[in-house]
Image (tube, rainbow, N blue to C red):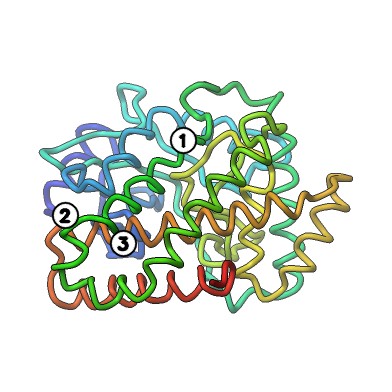
């Protein structure tokens, strides 16, 4: 397929690639490449398989979030601190070939510190980037309807129905899920209760990255925030909850509060953390049951489901 991608880069973007080097693209991508182009230019190519049920929602949001990301990349304060999308010759943010959907960015040279590898100085810089992002709404024209957070939380309903279905009692997942049936059902109910009690739909909304942890930043000359598939309008806590995974979580929150003069709602942090754990469990189950992963992928997904349940147990003990 690399030859096909090279042809598309030439025909749709006017880029003549000298080489495509495999790169890491994230959980939702089919493939990713560093593109070394004629003239010394470097780009980052991500490829999605829209035939996969868990990937299709990301593909459907491209035309909503990429224009907003492009404007953010031109923002005075965020320029060079977020990815810069590259449009096609036809001024589109994606191009397609069969089930493959391609998006392109300027390449960022640097290292990914990872969740456990973030230093204190990187943590403070990430807090500043989030503060700038959350204050950028008025200067960035966005499609507020398309980027609005989905507070229906349909994955809660889907997971509850799956747990109570015959499939959950007959599948290979049964041994993993059934001992935790009561925990998962209770956590789902608690999440929906918190959504309503905290009036999520009425909280002040800002532009949120949605997945701002140490594996989604690159240390270049400055820290650069990458992987923007979940860019959306939501309460600031939808970004800050990630502190639960962060080795310097307290420092991140304190720094963020200082930068924005913002009082963090810790009930919202708890809601978003629990919400994310439940959603991750459901997405991994969906990939296992609907996307025909191979044996190695299945083992990995089962491991992630197990970890997700353990994290829910820590947050919401029986």
First reached walking from the N terminus: tag 2 or tag 3: 3
Q: Which residue is mark 2?
A: 290
Q: Secondary structure at mark 2?
A: helix
Q: Secondary structure at mark 1?
A: loop
> How far is the residue under mark 1 from the one under mark 2?
22 Å
Camera-near label (1 vs 3) is 1
- With respect to residue 114, does 7 lie above or below? above
Query: Which residue is more in the foreground, 269 or 114?
Result: 269
Tell me the residue at 70%/33% (across/down). Answer: 203
Left or right: residue 294 compared with residue 178? left
Q: Which residue is mark 1?
A: 152
Left or right: residue 5 compared with residue 252? left
**Label 2 Cα crowd, 10 Å radius (few <14 / some 14-19 / many 20+):** few
Q: Which residue is mark 3?
A: 284
**Label 3 Cα crowd, 10 Å radius (few <14 / some 14-19 / many 20+):** many
Camera-near label (1 vs 2) is 1
| Callout 1–callout 2 Cβ contact below 8 Å | no
> In the rendered image, which quarter is residue 79 located in?
top right
Query: Which residue is more in the foreground, 226 or 312?
Result: 312
First reached walking from the N terminus: tag 1 or tag 3: 1
Tell me the residue at 51%/36% (across/down). Answer: 151
Tell me the residue at 66%/35% (across/down). Answer: 199
Query: Which residue is more in the foreground, 130 or 88?
Result: 130
- With respect to residue 132, does 190 lie above or below? below
Tell me the residue at 55%/22% (across/down). Answer: 144
First reached walking from the N terminus: tag 1 or tag 2: 1
């Amino acid at each position: 397929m690399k030859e096909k991608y090279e042809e598309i880069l030439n025909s749709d973007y006017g880029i003549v690639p000298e080489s495509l080097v495999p790169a890491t693209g994230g959980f939702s991508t089919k493939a990713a490449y560093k593109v070394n182009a004629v003239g010394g230019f470097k780009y980052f190519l991500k490829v999605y398989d829209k035939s996969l049920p868990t990937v299709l929602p990301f593909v459907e949001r491209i035309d909503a979030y990429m224009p907003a990301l492009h404007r953010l990349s031109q923002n005075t304060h965020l320029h060079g601190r977020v990815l810069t999308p590259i449009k096609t010759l036809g001024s589109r943010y994606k191009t397609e070939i069969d089930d493959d959907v391609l998006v392109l960015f300027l390449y960022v040279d640097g290292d990914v510190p990872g969740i456990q590898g973030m230093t204190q100085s990187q943590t403070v810089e990430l807090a500043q980037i989030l503060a700038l992002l959350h204050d950028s709404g008025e200067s960035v024209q966005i499609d507020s309807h398309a980027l609005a957070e989905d507070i229906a939380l349909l994955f809660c309903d889907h997971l509850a129905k799956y747990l109570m279905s015959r499939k959950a009692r007959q599948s290979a997942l049964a041994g993993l899920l059934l001992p935790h049936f009561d925990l998962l059902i209770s956590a789902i109910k608690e999440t929906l209760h918190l959504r309503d009690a905290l009036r999520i739909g009425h909280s002040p909304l800002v532009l949120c990255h949605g997945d701002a942890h140490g594996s989604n930043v690159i240390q270049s000359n400055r820290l650069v925030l990458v992987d923007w598939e979940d860019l959306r309008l939501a309460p600031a806590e939808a970004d800050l909850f990630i502190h639960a995974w962060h080795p310097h979580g307290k420092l991140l929150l304190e720094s963020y509060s200082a930068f924005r003069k913002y009082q963090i709602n810790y009930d919202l942090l708890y809601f978003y953390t629990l919400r994310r754990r439940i959603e991750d469990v459901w997405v991994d189950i969906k990939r296992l049951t609907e996307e025909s992963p191979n044996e190695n992928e299945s083992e990995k997904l089962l491991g992630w489901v197990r970890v997700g349940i353990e994290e829910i147990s820590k947050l919401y003990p029986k």
